[in-house]
Amino acid sequence: MKFPILLPLLALALPAASGFAEPINFENFGVGAGQSGGASLFQPGTGEPVTGQPAQATGTPAGPVMLNRVVAIVNEDIIVSSELQQSISQVTRQLQAKQTELPPRAVLEKQVLERLIMEHLQLQLAERNGIRIDDTMLNNKLRELARENNMTLGEFRDILERDGFSYNEFRDDLRREMTIKQLRQQMVGSRLKVSDQEIDNLLASLRSLDEDNVQYHLAHILIAVPEAAGPDEIEAAQRRAEGVLANLKNGADFSQTAISVSDGTTALDGGDIGWRSIGQMPTLFVEPLEGMRPGDISELLRSPGGFHIIKLVEQRGGERTIVRQTQVRHILLKADALHTDEENRIRIEQLEQRIRGGDDFASLARSNSQDTLSAARGGDLGWVSPGELVPPFEEAMDALSPGEVSDPVKTRFGWHLIQVMDRRDYDSTEEFKRSKARQMIRARKADEETFLWLRRLRDESYVEYRLES
């Protein structure tokens, strides 16, 4: 079963200079990420610290013991020790599930605390910007996750609770993830632009490298340099990075080293940034990769954000992309001032009966379909690739053999009758490659801009550490 590692476990540390913003990984989910919105150390209505009285044996009773303490102040918010310990326990379970050796306790505390700080900062900004995830949006997302795991929502909840996870905590974590995702879209994603010239340049580069279908599984370590750092700070970071590289060259485990020393967002994942094509990775990484084999570790790579070390874990691809396409046509009836949705359901059933009785599909599409563009072509949508159509339509279409007509299908557009005309295996078209290139460029820009935005957010905020050494 797949469970999501939510954003609090993906994007809470100061990000690597390349701003690696991984797709959400639906494995090894652990609930109970740090709570947002602050915490109180006072008894309700008293203004007094929460204290507890330990069990007494003999002698003078012990004094009051603080059950919770502040480990960081984040603007007007605080992070308390119970929140930190809960998140550390969660990360520890995930690392143990991956059979990854745990770093020293102090190192783990520092990494997790940085993630919590960045989560609090982003949630504070989301609140100031009026970003809210209501219960309807949250429940829709939960149903989507359940469908992806081939379950009903009730079954999904039962499995969570059977495996020891709190459904309410899962909901809270998911709401925070969705809030932060929406904030990033507002602050970064909405401003990203990709020009045709950028697409042309990338496609030309990929053709010259013969790399348009090659992917690289990378791991990454960042030794960060503060913004506007002086020569002494840069030199100190470089010496530290050189020491890390020397240890790796002498056989130190890359994953364990990343967990212990990396300042990148994927530190607690052992530096693993997943599979990337050339077009999806920072240009800083492209040249070193040309001479690397799986298992190789790069030399130090310098960027404005610090010193990077990458490891090529695996490499795959190079084969051509073959797409299974469907030639399909449809008739669409939409609710309007003249016809209700229920009336359209009855009308589409009547059209279905006429087609099954021998009437021509194309003629009925021309005279009845409210998709005006395709109606003029007898309902023909042309050749479509997987993912181009809304899921209910595509699922019904995929279940048909050429020549077959569907039962009435309901989508957000209205009621459809669908007929599959033909299928083919098709080598990727230039339009498909351009669409793919646009997505790659946008993802790369989003990574880079998210890193810069998060670093500015961190630099412009008040953070005070109170974690004991």
Image (spheres, rainbow, N blue to C red):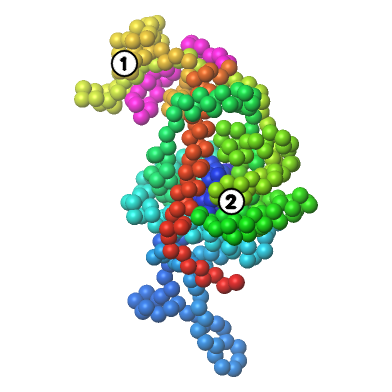
Q: As drawn, which residue projects farthest toward the bottom? A: 59
Q: Is residue 423 magenta?
A: yes
Q: Nearer the viewer, mark 2 or mark 1?
A: 2
Q: Which residue is mark 1?
A: 372
Work out whether residue 437 or residue 400 is closer to the camera in this orientation and state it: 437
Q: What is the CA distance from the residue labelled 2 to the residue labelled 1?
A: 55 Å
Question: Is label 2 in a helix, a strand or a loop?
Answer: strand
Q: Residue at x 78, y 52 (%)?
A: 250
Mark on residue 306? 2
Magenta part of the chain = 401-426
Query: Quick check: 129 above or below 412?
Result: below
Whether residue 257 can be seen here: no
Q: Which numbered disc, 2 or 1, marks the residue that appears first in the sequence? A: 2
Query: Quick check: 49 above or below 179?
Result: below
Q: Is residue 177 magenta?
A: no
Left or right of 323 on screen, residue 196:
left
Query: Quarter holding the N terminus?
Result: top right
Count neighbours of disc 2 (C-alpha within 10 A) and say few if under 14, some if 14 to 19, many if 20 or more.
many
Residue 331: x, y in percent?
36, 16
Tell me the amino acid under the disc marked 1.
Thr
Whether residue 2 can be seen here: yes
Residue 212: x, y in percent?
60, 26
Left or right of 178 on screen, residue 99:
right
